[in-house]
Amino acid sequence: MNHAPLLSPLTLEEASLKDGLPSTPGLYAWWIIDPTKLARVPLVTQENGLSLIYLGIAKSGPSAASDLRSRVLGKHIRGSLGNSTLRRSLAALLWEEQGWTPIRPGDRVLLSPGENGLLSQWMAQNLRVAWLPHPEPWTVEAELIARLQPPLNVMANQDHPFYPTIRAARAALEAASLGKVKAATSVPRQYEQQVAQDYERRGYEVDLGRGVSDWGVDLFARRGNELIAVQVKRYGGTKRPVNRAMVMELEGARRYFDCTSAALVTDGRVLPDARLVADKRGIALHHLDDQEATEAAPEVLDFERIWTEYIMPLEGKELELSGGRKNTILKADWSGVTRQTDSGPSVIKIEAFRDVVNHLLHKGPLTRGEINQQYVGRASSGIARILAEVPFFEYGGRPASLRYRPQLTSSLG
C-alpha cells in the first residue's frame, strides 16, 4: 500500500478548507512540528521535518458511518476528550503542564469548555494533519500502525515502548477527573483560610465560601464600596501553573457576582499568557506562600486506584486461561472491560468489578458462585481472571476463591 500522502501534512486551517479534507472514508496521520512540545514522548523526526504522533481511520467497519472530514474536523479538532482518542491522549500528557483541570460531569473525562478550547488552540499551533482516502481503512490500519509506529496510538500498538507510559498517563487523567489527586494539586481549605486571613489583616471583611460549588470564586473581600472576587490556586510544589483560562473564568465570575474587581492568589507559578490576560482585564495576581503546608495524607487503597493502576493498563493484553485458552482485553475504561472470548466479544460492566473489589477489601474472600449471585451477567470466571492480575489479589484454593492479601500491598511503594 502506498501511504505517501500520509507523509505530506497540512495546517488545520488548510485541512478545513472546502477543497481540504474529503467526505470519504480513509486514514489520517497527525504530526507535530516541534518534538519538545511533547517532551515525554519518544519522537523521531522524519524526512518531512516533522514527527508522527498518531494514526487514525475514518470508518471503522462496513456499517460505520464516518468520513475523513467529519472525523478529523468534528471529533479531533472541534470535539471533546470524550469522542477523540487523540485529544484524550494529548490532554493526559499536557494537563498538569498547562494547568488544566480534568472533570467528569457524566461517565467520561472532559475539560471545561475554556480549557477544551485551549487544547484546540494548542493543536492548531503545534500539529499538522495528512490523510489518505481508502474505501476500507479498517483493513489496513493495524499494518500501518505496525509500520509507522505512532507513539500515541493505544490499540494495535502494545509493543511500542511508549505504550505503558501513555496508558499510565491516561489512567492518571481519569483519576484526576474523579478527584483522586494529591492534596498538593488541589486547593486545601486551610490555604483558602490563610488567604482570607491575609485580606482581613488588610482591613477587608471576608466571606469565605463553603469550599464546594464556588462558581469560580473562593472568597469575597469587601471594604467600603470595594468588592473583590478572589480565586485561590494552591499549586506550589507541583507542575501545574495558573493559565489564562483560569484568569478568563475568574473575570466571568467577577461580572456574574457584580464585583468591582477580582484577584487570583497562588503559591505557584503563573504562565505569561495568564499575566497578559490579567493585565488587560485588570485582575490582580498575588503570590502568597502556603504557611500551613502539611505532608500529603497516606495513599488509600480503593477501587478507583486499583482500577486505574492495575485494570485499565490491561487493555490490549492477552490473558491465559485454564486448558490453554486465552482472552484478549479489547477495552478497559470507566464503563467496564470488553474481552475477546472463544464465543466472541464479551462485556463486563464496571459495577460488577466495583462490588467484588469492595467486598474483597472490606468483607473477605468470594467464590465464583458468590460472584455470580451478585452479578446477573454470570461472568465470574472473567472477573476472577482479570482481578487475579492485581498483585495483592489471589485466586485459587477449594472452592476456588478470590481473596485480598494485605501483606502484598507493600509493592505499591
Image (tube, rainbow, N blue to C red):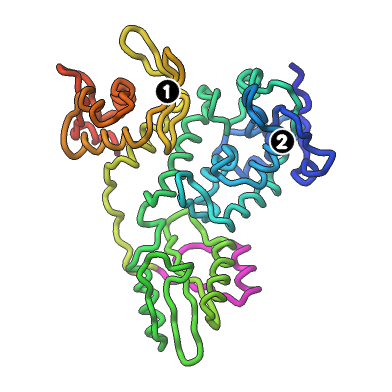
Q: Is residue 80 above or below residue 246?
A: above
Image-based side of 377 in relation to 98, left or right: left
Image-based side of 304 in relation to 98, left or right: left
> Which residue of the protein is positioned furthest toward the top in this rendering?
323
For numbered disc 2, what is the local secondary structure? loop
Q: Quadrant of the C terminus?
A: top left
Q: Position of residue 171 (x, y in %)?
A: 44, 39
Asked if residue 237 shows in the view, the reply is yes
Asked if residue 389 shows in the view, the reply is no
Image-based side of 220 in relation to 124, left or right: left
Q: Which residue is mark 1?
A: 346
- Amino acid type at image mark 2: Leu
Please tell me how crowded label 1 is: few (under 14), some (14-19), or many (20+) other residues with Cα within 10 Å.
some
- Marked residue nearer the N-terminal end (1 or 2): 2
Residue 34, picture quadrant: top right
Q: Position of residue 292 (x, y in %)?
A: 31, 67
Q: Which residue is mark 2?
A: 50
Q: Which residues lie in the magenta part?
A: 267-289
Q: Position of residue 410 (x, y in %)?
A: 24, 36
For numbered disc 1, what is the local secondary structure? strand
Q: Position of residue 274 (x, y in %)?
A: 59, 65
Residue 314: assigned label: none
Q: Identify the residue shown where x is 64% and y is 68%.
A: 276
> Which residue of the protein is positioned furthest toward the right in this rendering?
19
Q: Identify the residue shown where x is 81% and y is 44%.
A: 17
Q: Quadrant of the N terminus?
A: top right
Q: Identify the residue shown where x is 45% and y is 65%.
A: 233
Compute the Cα span from label 1 to label 2.
40 Å
